[in-house]
Amino acid sequence: MKALEGVRILDMTHVQSGPTCTQLLAWFGADVIKVERPGVGDATRGQLRDIPDVDSLYFTMLNHNKRSITLNTKSDTGKEIFTKLIETCDVMAENFAPGALDRMGFTWERIQEINPRMIYASVKGFGPGPYEDCKVYENVAQCTGGSASTTGFDDGPPLVTGAQIGDSGTGLNLALGIVTALYHREKSGRGQRVTCAMQDGVLNLCRVKMRDQQRLQHGPLKEYPQYPNGTFGDATPRSGNASGGGQPGWIVKCKGWENDPDAYIYVITQAAAFPALAKAMGREEWLEDPEWSTPEGRLPHLDQVFGEIEKWTMTKTKFEIMDILNPLNVPCGPILSMKELAEEWSLRDTGTVVEVDHPTRGKYLTVGNPIKLSDSPSEVQRSPLLGEHTDEILSEVLGYSTEEIAAAKDAGAV
Ligand code: COA
């Protein structure tokens, strides 16, 4: 039995943040019913298309293991069907622009009236405050949540990161909120409202930068590249590739960097492993010199330290460095390209990268469930076509007869 078997989710999510949440819950075994506008569907079905008239990878990679029903929740018959779905589902998840469901007539108060056990989970860009009505996409959240101001190099502009921390990151928060509320419902018998703001989600992931904001009041941040020669302002600055923890690290070039944009490796000069690193590099003399042998001695000239390390790493490939340093307990990480990750056999073996077959697209690669449960393994099933399960859901979940389904279609509700 899958961990969330028996949990039914009314999935009103679209684009990325909400769909990542309900996809995770579907992988854990929940029955996720994705509600989409008739004829249109989730906007991502048509965005960034690589094959004409075929659901985009954007959509297929975010909506596995779900069923799709088309439903116009603004029409009278659509509202009737939607109300019945609220009655029968455990969770409703949505990430529309603020107020969209209220405008359809489905406020939290109304939802509680229909089904007091309903858990109503939403992603919004911002929590209550001056920006609560704003529409928000990934990069807006990265910029307003503290990520962009702290990412990049000191002499360059703020940068967004490729990791979708605002969307997929907040989707994770929402999923945790939902399963926590389900657990709570076991005891209380009642549903509750779960809200996750993308700004909050990004700020949560930037916790160490808020830490540094306060450390700054007590002196320069010695692990930042601005120390000791640069200047610090009154806010946490961008720290390039410096490590966010107490052990200095940096990205250094490896053999082939001139032609390969990913021929780099991250090396962390963890204090305990530094002697082994120095020996591997043939720099035993460092161990006799306190400016090199001690963490405090190295801090004021970390650029020089990593400059010397780089001279050595440039003589080897990133994988050779990985093979040399890991047995010495020197933490390091080759910069892996998406191509390398897509081809990595160990990720295929664990189901983190999965090949999926789709009726109109054919085979494609996706990222599977990153959370592994021993008793509830995830099988990745293709995303649904638009409205593929409309009839099935109306008859199986709501008990509609063939005539009633035909009438709903005639009314333009599904
Ligand atoms: N039947 C009828 N109407 C439907 C419907 C359905 N099944 N599904 C959606 N709609 C309507 C909505 O009610 C809304 O109508 P309204 O404007 O009259 O209230 C309309 O479709 C569009 O929804 P909206 O959310 O405003 O879409 P958008 O494309 O303009 O904005 C976002 C997209 C992502 C910016 C916005 O939804 C948002 O800010 N969401 C919250 C934050 C978030 O999750 N952002 C990350 C997305 S990856």
Image (tube, helix red, strand yellow):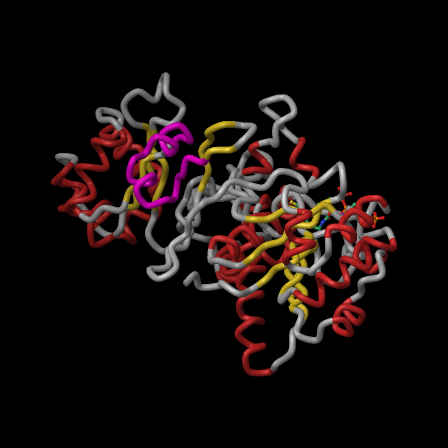
Whether residue 136 is visible = yes
Does 10 sit above or below residue 368?
Answer: below
Residue 64 appears left or right of 136 = left
Please determine whether, in this image, residue 211 is positioned above or below residue 223: below
Foreground pick, 382 / 324: 382
Query: Which residue occupies 26% across, 51% down?
Result: 270
Judge whether 325 appears above or below 93 on screen: above
Magenta segment, which residues? 337-356
Q: Give the x, y percent position of residue 246.
A: 36, 56
Figure label count: 0
Q: Residue at x 69, y 53 (%)?
A: 12
In the image, farthest residue toward the top: 259
Task: Tell me if residue 238 comes above or below residue 92 in the rendering.
Answer: above
Camera-side residue of 254 and 164: 164
The answer to if 351 sits in the magenta stretch is yes
Q: Quadrant of the N terminus?
A: bottom left
Q: Residue at x 80, y 62 (%)?
A: 106
Residue 127 occupies which quadrant of the picture? bottom right
Decide which of 16, 298 is in the foreground and name it.
16
Residue drawn at the location 52% of the way across and 38% of the way down:
162
Residue 208 relative to residue 282: left or right: right
Q: Horizontal placement of 2 versus 158: left or right?
A: left
Magenta run includes residue 123? no
Front position in the image: 367 or 229 = 367
Percent of width and height locating residue 169: 54, 52
Specify whether residue 123 is in view. Answer: no
Q: Position of residue 201 (x, y in %)?
A: 58, 56
* Left or right of 243 in this view: 326: left
